[in-house]
Amino acid sequence: MNEKTRTSGVVPPEVALGFDGLTLLKGMIAGEYPPPPIAETLGFGLVEAEPGRAVFEGSPGFRHYNPIGVVHGGFAMTLLDSALGCAVHTTLKAGEGYTTLEVKVNLVRAITKDTGTVRATGRLIHRGRTTATAEADLRDAKGNLLAHGTTTCMIFPAKK
């Protein structure tokens, strides 16, 4: 993601609901739709999307530090939450929506400004009619596990 040339925004619901989830996410990657403001705020972006899978990358920096001198856990949690939710989002049919019901994250290694680019990969575990679950991991460029998590999402059917 080239943060200097892309501006964030929100795709209007009437537009977003006109596409299946995977098409919308691929449109964001291609630059047809803006990334959400949180991506600009924290400096991360969606880099891959395929059925049941979504990948985000971000670069932790000093601006993400907490009072104890490492990157705040919320940075890792936000990337994981994004990968988890978007893994579910890839399965939505046009008109369907979803929301997160629960997220569980384990932070297993400190992240610093020297960690380099990190990658959160979300994978769908189950997609039912009204709920979906997914898992994700956050790794550095060497493949070291930094954090992992799971989510449960509620699916809203398309309005008829």
Image (cartoon, helix red, strand yellow):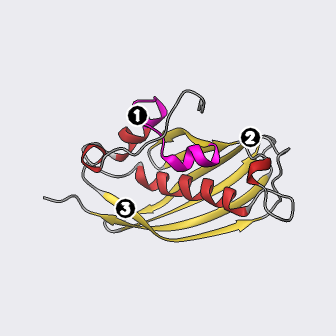
Q: Which residue is mark 3?
A: 98
Q: CA distance from mark 1 to mark 2?
A: 23 Å
Name which residue lies at 36% across and 46% down.
Answer: 21
* Dots 3, 2 in contact, CB < 8 A: no
Q: Which amino acid type corresponds to the residue marked 2 in the rendered image?
A: Thr
Evaluate if marks 1 and 2 touch, with contact meaning CB atoms under 8 Å apart. no
**Which is nearer the N-term, disc 3 or disc 2?**
3
Q: Is residue 30 magenta?
A: yes
Disc 2 is placed on an element classified as loop
- Closer-to-camera residue (35/144): 35
Image position of 49 (left or right of 56) = left
Check disc 2 and report the residue beneath it. 117
Q: Give the alpha-carbon distance from disc 3 to disc 2, as whole Å.
A: 29 Å
Q: Which of the two discs, 3 and 1, labels the residue nearer the N terminus?
A: 1
Question: In the displayed structure, would residue 2 be above or below residue 91?
Answer: above
**Residue 27: mark:** 1
Front-most of 6 and 138?
A: 6
Q: Residue at x 56, y 46 (%)?
A: 39
Q: Mark 1 falls on what kind of element?
A: helix
- Mark 3: which amino acid? Tyr
User: Helix, strand, or loop for circle 3?
Assistant: strand
For the question of whether residue 55 can be seen, the reply is: no
x, y percentage for residue 103? Answer: 56, 69
The answer to whether any part of residue 139 appears in the image is: yes
Q: Is residue 35 above or below residue 146?
A: above
Q: Can you give x and y, in whole percent of width and height, for residue 75 in the image?
A: 68, 56
Determine crowd level at label 1: few under 14, some 14-19, many 20+ residues with C-alpha closer than 10 A: some
Tell me: residue 105, above or below residue 94: below
Residue drawn at point x = 28 percent, y = 42 percent: 19
Highlighted magenta segment, given as a residue range = 26-43
